[in-house]
Structures are given as C-alpha cells and as structure tokens.
Image (cartoon, grey):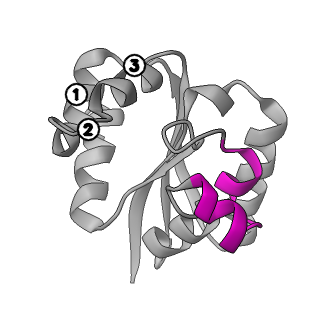
C-alpha cells in the first residue's frame, strides 16, 4: 500500500541547488514519488505547531530559531514504505551516529550538527499527516 510522508531539507542546505538535485535524484532512484514541493520560509507559528511535541525540551528554542533562519524545501513523498525509505535515506538524527554507522546517508554527507542535521522525516503515519498539514497549509 502506498502512503505519504513529509520530507524537509532544512535552511542550512535548502538554498544549495546541487544538494537539492542530488536529494531529488535519490528519492526517485529509491522508487519514491514527489507529489508536491514547496520552497519557503516557515513562520514561527508553523514551526511551533510543527515541533509542539518538543516544547519544553532543552533544544526547543534552538530548533525553532534554526528552522526559522531561512527557507526550507518541503516535499510530500509517496510510495511503498515511504516513511521507512525516506528515513533510511536521511539517516539518524544524531550526526556522530550518521557519520560512523550510516556514512552514505544525507545527514552524514551534509549535516553540520544534531540540530543542523539538514533533513527531517516524519516518524510515523500520523506524524506525516499532521506535518504535511502544517507545512502545506492543509494539503
């Protein structure tokens, strides 16, 4: 069964055409379809809704600030096991883990730190629906 997920390229990478082209080629090479793309600067309100589960955590303010620092590139991706496939492409959230145990992932190749790791992927189907609605204004 095909399902959908949200994929994000974060601000520190979203302006780099070479990275975008590489990411989009890999998405297609792994049998996923790009249903919609949006390049924009998310509002503080969007980011607060997007990261509501992290409110109160030590990194929350830094996350909102970093994600609001520039444009992001958002994708609605569709395919078989799309959530798992996208998360495998981007790699672990922790940069040191990505670098050492998943060296071929996007985060390993392009990430700068745990917060500025370059990419986001929904964790499950419910998250995907909510995150798509936040970033694509009730798609």
Depth check: give the residue in front, 8 or 29. Answer: 8
Position of the N terminus by quadrant = bottom left
* Residue sticking out furthest to the right: 18
Residue 120 is situated, as x and y percent measured from the top left of the image, at 48, 48
Label 2 residue SS: loop
Asked if the magenta segment contains residue 12, the reply would be: no
- In the rendering, which numbered label is found on residue 48? 1
Circle 1/circle 2 CB separation < 8 Å: yes
- In the rendering, which numbered label is found on residue 51? 2
Q: Nearer the viewer, mark 2 or mark 3?
A: 3
Graded by Cα atoms within 10 Å as few (under 14), some (14 to 19) or many (20 or more), the crowding at tag 2 reads few
Residue at 28%, 32% in the rendered image: 60
Q: Quadrant of residue 14?
A: top right
In the image, taking residue 17 as reference, residue 102 lies left or right, namely left
| Residue corresponding to mark 3 | 65
Residue 54 is situated, as x and y percent measured from the top left of the image, at 22, 42
Asked if the magenta segment contains residue 108, the reply would be: yes
- Give whichever of discs 3 and 1 has the lower sequence position: 1
Residue at 55%, 34% in the rendered image: 10
| Label 1 – label 2 distance at C-alpha | 5 Å
- Which range is magenta? 95-111
């Amino acid at each position: 069964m095909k399902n959908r997920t949200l994929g994000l390229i974060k601000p520190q990478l979203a302006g780099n055409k070479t990275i975008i082209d590489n990411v989009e080629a890999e998405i297609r090479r792994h049998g996923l379809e790009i249903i919609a793309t949006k390049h924009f600067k998310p509002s503080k309100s969007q980011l607060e809704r997007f990261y509501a589960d992290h409110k109160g955590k030590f990194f929350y303010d830094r996350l909102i600030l970093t994600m609001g620092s520039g444009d992001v590139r958002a994708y609605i991706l569709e395919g078989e096991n799309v959530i798992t496939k996208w998360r495998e492409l981007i790699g672990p959230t922790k940069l040191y883990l990505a670098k050492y145990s998943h060296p071929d992932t996007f985060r390993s190749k392009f990430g700068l730190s745990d917060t500025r790791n370059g990419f986001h992927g929904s964790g499950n189907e419910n998250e995907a629906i909510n995150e798509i609605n936040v970033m694509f204004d009730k798609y």
